[in-house]
Amino acid sequence: MTKKLLFFGLLFLCAACTKAAPKLVYNGDTLEWNTEFKKKQCGTLDIKKNIIEVSGIACSRVTPGYIWMQSDETDENTNPFIIATDEKGAERACKVKFNKIYRWDWEDMSGGVYDGKNYLFIGAFGDNDETDGEYSIIYFEEPAIDPVNKPEVTVTASRIKYVYPDGNKHNAEALMYDNREQMIYIITKVYYDVCKVYSIPFRLDYGDEEQTLEYVCDLGVRSDLGESADDKPYKGFHLVTAADISPDGKYILIKNHNNIVATYCWILYWERQDGESVADAVKRQPQPLKCYNTYEWQGEAICWLNDYVFYTTSDSDEGNPPIFKYTRPYPEGVENVIGDDSKRETSKVFIDNQLYIRNNERLYTLDGRRVK
């Protein structure tokens, strides 16, 4: 059976089993669904005009209305790049090349603010066979997107080299940045075993010396995966492929994929409490999102637009992958402030590391309260 036939067979299986989708057992508890979000396909990525395999995405904060995308489908001799499209995915708005690349096998992307500047972070830490051992986070200031005058730009990136605290080699495919703590979080991808969360503060002065990550926690426990090898593809949360934290730091998403059994894919969701760190939040029980009920082949990319909207997309699997948009209701009055298209008359700005909405000359919090 070819890869594509297997993919469509899994889609059929997923559609047939949607109503009976299994609930997730996590840290010994059967979790209840979060039903706030609704899902729709907002676009389709034209891979002939863009990139082959999307393994990471991040919403632009410099030029609202666009989504940055990166691929790990290339080799060391190819000059890697990232691209930007709108949520429809048909046309490439910008291509970014790099003056120097330290390592390929990029697996995830995130955006964040540090010292008043917007940065993009790329996790160069894929290691499926756990034999490489050279891991780093590539970062650079986010460029503006100007499809007409600057459809292609070149940037200079820096990196943070790191090792794991246990001294071992690990495969990772998920990275997220917290604007509140100015902390980077990395999550390992483990086959049929629990995945682990690590952290490192973001700074500009690490240089070329290897840093040691700090262990945060496991995502779930081994007993959730079943007692036998035959159970493991069907139970528990493993194979983490993407993660993101909302711009104001309030909400966390971590997703997995399972190409063996389509219905055993989840997006986990946490709402941070006042004063709570990301590390403490992800140690609590999450909520799986019920709207994530359509299988994504190699679903490896997720990003927040704001507190009410996020996106996912996936590997092309020799076709054009869909771009999905997830929304939950805005609080009363906020929808008119934010709108569904942030390119129209609103923008988002950071002041003292807090995200605000600017509409004309007025400033609002994300819940719609006018600041000035």
Image (cartoon, grey):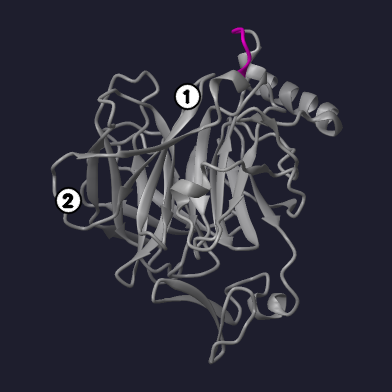
Q: Are marks 2 and 1 in contact (CB under 8 Å)?
A: no
The disc placed on residue 206 is 2
Identity of the amino acid at label 2?
Tyr
Q: Residues within 10 Å of mark 2 (few under 14, many from 20)?
A: few
Q: Inspect this view and state whether residue 101 appears.
A: no
Type of secondary structure dominating the magenta stretch: loop
Which numbered disc flags the more N-terminal residue, 2 or 1? 1
Q: In the figure, residue 8 lies in which quadrant?
A: top right
Q: Nearer the viewer, residue 113 or 149?
A: 113
The residue lying at 31 percent from left, 40 percent from top is 214
Name the residue that disc number 1 marks: 190
Q: Position of residue 150 (x, y in %)?
A: 37, 67
When the figure is inspected, residue 158 is found, relative to residue 298, above or below; the finding is below
Disc 2 to disc 1, how far (Cα)? 28 Å
Q: Nearer the viewer, residue 123 or 98?
A: 123
Q: Nearer the viewer, residue 343 or 334?
A: 334
Q: Is residue 116 magenta?
A: no
Identity of the amino acid at label 1?
Val
